[in-house]
Image (cartoon, rainbow, N blue to C red):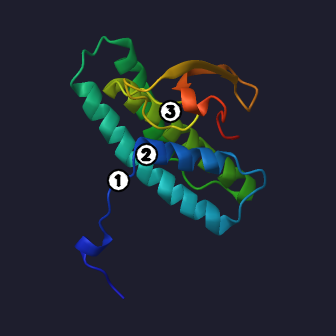
Amino acid sequence: MSATQEQTDCRVPSTASMRAAAAWSLDQPTLPRHEQLKLWSGDLGTFLEHLAAAVEQLAAGLPAADVPVRVAMVGAGEARRRMNEPEAAGLHGETERVKRLARSVMALCDHHDTLTGARMCLACDKPLDDGQPTVPYEHASPSGGAKVSGRIHAACASVGRPRR
C-alpha cells in the first residue's frame, strides 16, 4: 500500500512534546527490545533534524557574539554529529547511542526555548504565561547531577515534576 505525500505529512510536535518523548525514553529502567530502539532512534533523529535546523535558523537572526547563540550552535553541531553516528553493536551499545540522541533532543529543546524567549514550567513542561502565578523551583537531577532550578506554575507546586 502506498500513501501520497499529503497523507504522510504531519505537523512537527512542539518542543514540550519532543522533550517529553526524549525524557520518557531516557527513563526506561530496563533495556528495550531492539525493535523499540529502532523506532526511538527514528523518532529522535527526526526531532533532531527539525530542532537543529530551527535552532540554527533562530541563531542566524541574532548577534553571533551572544553567548546563548554560541552555546545553541555548539549544541546543534553536537546533535548533528550524534545523528551521524552509525548504529552501535549490541543492544547495550545501541541503547547508549539512542540515549545520546535523547539527551541532544532535550538540550536542543532548551536552546530553542532560550532563543525564542520561551519560559517553560519545570513541572509540567507547559509555557509560563505572564499572567499566571509562578513560584521558584529547585530540584536535584534524578541522575545525581547538577540541580535544576527555574520557575513552575503555582498550581504545579503541589504536584512537582514527574519522575524521570
- Asked if one can make out residue 122 in the rendered structure from this viewpoint, the answer is no
CA gap, disc 3 and disc 1 = 17 Å
Q: List the single residue furthest toward the bottom.
A: 1
Frontmost residue, 128 versus 158:
158
Quadrant assignment, res 139: top right
Q: What's the residue type where badge 2 is placed?
A: Leu
- Circle nearer the viewer, 3 or 1: 1
Cα–Cα span, label 3 and label 2: 10 Å
Q: Residue at 63% across / 51% down in the picture? A: 25
Q: Amino acid at mark 1?
A: Val
Disc 3: which residue: 107
Secondary structure of the residue carrying tag 1 is loop
Compute the Cα span from label 2 to label 1. 11 Å
Q: Position of residue 65 (x, y in %)?
A: 30, 11
Q: Position of residue 162 (x, y in %)?
A: 66, 40
Q: Amino acid at mark 3?
A: Ala
In front here: 63 or 18?
18
Residue 114 sits above or below residue 65 on the image: below
Determine whether the residue tagged by mark 2 lies in a helix, strand or loop: helix
Q: Could you tell me which residue is drawn at 43 percent across and 49 percent down?
A: 47
Q: Which residue is mark 1?
A: 12
Q: Would you name the residue on which mark 2 appears?
A: 48
**Rendering coords of residue 7 (x, y %):** 28, 74
Instruction: Determine whether label 3 and label 1 are within 8 Å by CB.
Output: no
